[in-house]
Image (tube, helix red, strand yellow):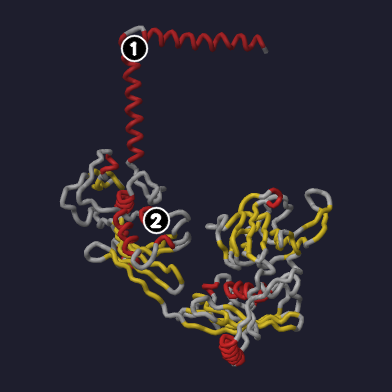
Amino acid sequence: MKKTGARANPSLAGTLRHRMNSAGAAMATTDGRWALVSTGLTALVAGALAWMAVGMMPVSRPMVSPGRSSLPYALFMKLIRASEPAGQAADNSDNANPNPGVENRTVTLDAGDTLAGMLEDVGISAQDANAVVAAMGKNFDPRGLRAGQSFDLTYSVATIDASGNAPAPVPSAPRTTTVMVNHKPVVVPVDAEEDGSGATEENSEPISRLLSLHFSPTIDKEITVTRTTEGGYTAEVETKELQVHRHRAGGAIDSSLYLAATQAGIPTDVVIDMIRMFSYKVDFQRDLHPGDRFEVFYDYYYTPEGLPAKFGSISYAMMTLGGKQIPMYRFQADPNEPPEYFDQKGESAKGMLMKTPVDGARISSGFGSRFHPILGFTRMHKGVDFAVPTGTPVMAAGAGTIKFMGRASGYGNFVLLTHGNNYSTAYGHLKRFAPGMRQGARVRQGQVFAYSGMSGMATGPHLHYEIRAGGGQVNPLTVKMAQGRMLMGKLLRLFQEKRLEIDNLVATTSLEAKVTDNATDLRQARVK
């Protein structure tokens, strides 16, 4: 095998040696070198012509989307429209836009974006975008817009006729260029930025001119901004006349008041308000048992189409716990102060401190001696742990002042509130503090000042809650707190008259088993 290969290799080597000698002989002469150079130039020109031919081929399905093309949007659209066959416009006459050059579009505000920025992103000029915001500001603060708000836009766009020409020339002759589309020459304008000259046309128009903008910031309000004949913008606000409905709803409590009320079709904001009403009188962890009942009499406003718009107020609510009825009535004793809730005897529902500073809480560890899950030994647990998901709002158990807010060893993120009369409350393992909260700030009873978490020495998300009296911790579940004020004299008589009025309204209103349709979005539900 080796000898055979040895005989073959000299033959191949000889052939290559012969060709190299021939090429060397050719390069040794002037005519040979010139022939080699001319052959290379011919190949280079042929390649360039082939590349240009490919570029002149018609584009039937362009793979470029508006707004992301290297071409200006107006030029891109003109090329696409000019590439359509002449008879195609006639074939689609039945589906033609009744207002050529005017288009509608719905856009959504992204997180962190502004209204003016959003309009500029879709092709509206900065001048028009700022004019729209200024016109709207007389009736609505654009800073109140939230991410996800949708807007209906109507705007004009640059158009060309069937022959591919612009509809009307501008006073100053624009710079143009000719491109081949479907083997036909098409004349299109050249933007100053495109040719790199930096020059601008005095009478140039933006890609799109906004004609109107419409949106609904709330379910009962619609705002429309339209372009005037003078070129400015004007805003109109239409407020729907809401209709108030009075509902009387209730049911049995199987697991929690919140779940039972929402299953009965009661709006969430009503349920939360009802929980806060009873949070001073009821321990939602220990006092509720399966079979207990609730009832609520409240107002809710609806649009003329029957869509719920906003919560009014609760006039009356009652919980029946273990056969004991706990009614609450809404009464405004002082016209300069917000209304409060009182029981049938005229005693305020508000105590000095709330029994449960979080909604839907489950006690995971009580007050007293326990085995610490992290330290590994038994020690005194001087508070109550409420097992709640991370991010649950934490309310101030009573009105007071933030004495401390920050990091505190094993407590993690920690807040200490002072309430007067030698009482204070402590909150540990918080995830974060509410905006605007700081040390020394005043808080109202029931105000959300922080959110639960598992900072510090914690094995899971929960709220550690303490009540401190005279400098030491006491059991929040058994401590006797001072109750709210008792109405006396003339105020008590006025309250009793109001209570009888509410009782008559409740008695003449049928109990609804299902207030609204079962919809995931309250705005999609309808009143029955």
Mark 2 lies on a secondary structure that is: helix
Image location of residue 67, percent across then percent down: 38, 50
**Residue 460, image x, y percentages:** 72, 55
Total tally of numbered discs in the picture: 2
444 and 80: which is toward the camera: 444
Visible in this render: residue 295? no
Q: Badge 1: few (under 14), some or many (20 or more) residues near its Cα, within 10 Å?
A: some
Q: On the image, which quarter does residue 431 sit in?
A: bottom right
Q: Disc 2 or 1, which lies upstream in sequence?
A: 1
Question: Residue beneath label 1, please?
Answer: 32
In the depicted view, which residue is nearer to us: 433 or 440?
A: 440
Residue 181 place in picture, x, y as percent: 30, 47
Residue 96 drawn above or below residue 407? below
Q: Determine whether label 2 and label 1 are within 8 Å by CB.
A: no
Give the residue displayed 75% in from the left and 68% down from the top.
477
Is any part of residue 40 visible from this angle?
yes
Q: Which residue is pictured at 20% across the width and 47% down the height?
A: 174
Q: Position of residue 57 (x, y in %)?
A: 34, 43
In the rendered image, the quadrant that contains the N terminus is top right
What mark, if any, has residue 118 been given in the picture? Answer: 2
Q: What secondary structure is marked by label 1?
A: helix
* Occupied quadrant, residue 444: bottom right
